[in-house]
Amino acid sequence: MGMRSIAVVTVLTVVGALFAAAPAEAANPTLHFSKAYVNSPGSDTGSNSSLNAEYVVISNSSYTTSYTLTGYTISDRSAHVYRFRTFVLRPRASVTLHTGSGTNTSTNLYWGSRAYIWTNTGDTAYLKNSVGTLKDSCAWGSVASYVLC
């Protein structure tokens, strides 16, 4: 092999390695928690509006991929579990899961709990797929109101 052939092979190897590298989306999961509002504003009265001011936000940062979340779960350290019914999260969209009750839409879902789920002094939110594989988590210590995940 001559010097010219070695140079061409080297350039092709470097270019091939660049294209074979994982896409940017693989480095940062496109389906992820983006916010956890764990301490609803005002007094914890236990009213439905107070419960609904406690929530987590799941975001899809992909430009092209929709995620079918049917059967996925969100849980905490205390084994509270929310299971998604039929639901698709479109590209560049987010859905807010409120603790209390309400009418589900494409952007707001409701756990239906009559008690607070997220612990203000420290907790972890877990997102698992329908077979139980962890897809993302968001952990916090003591917070005044919310954390960005």
Image (tube, rainbow, N blue to C red):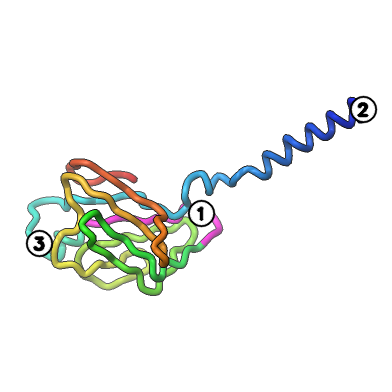
Mark in the foreground, 3 or 2: 2
Give the residue at mark 3: 46
Which of the two residues, 98 or 129, is positioned nearer the viewer here? Answer: 129
Q: Decide whether residue 59 is among the magenta residues.
A: yes
**For residue 7, side relative to residue 87 (left or right):** right
The quadrant in which residue 58 appears is bottom left
Residue located at (17% from left, 51% from top) = 119
Mark in the foreground, 1 or 2: 2
Give the residue at mark 1: 62
> Quarter of the image containing the N terminus?
top right
Q: Are marks 1 and 3 in contact (CB under 8 Å)?
A: no
Q: Position of residue 32 (x, y in %)?
A: 40, 52
Residue located at (67% from left, 39% from top) = 18
Q: Amino acid at mark 2?
A: Gly
Q: Decide whether residue 3 is among the magenta residues.
A: no
Give the residue at mark 2: 2
Residue 116 vertical position relative to residue 22 in the rendered view, above or below: below
Q: Amino acid at mark 1?
A: Ser
Mark 2 element type: loop
Q: Position of residue 145 (x, y in %)?
A: 19, 46
Q: Which residues are magenta?
A: 53-65
**For residue 86, side relative to residue 79 (left or right):** right
Counting every numbered tag in the picture gives 3
Q: Amino acid at mark 3?
A: Gly
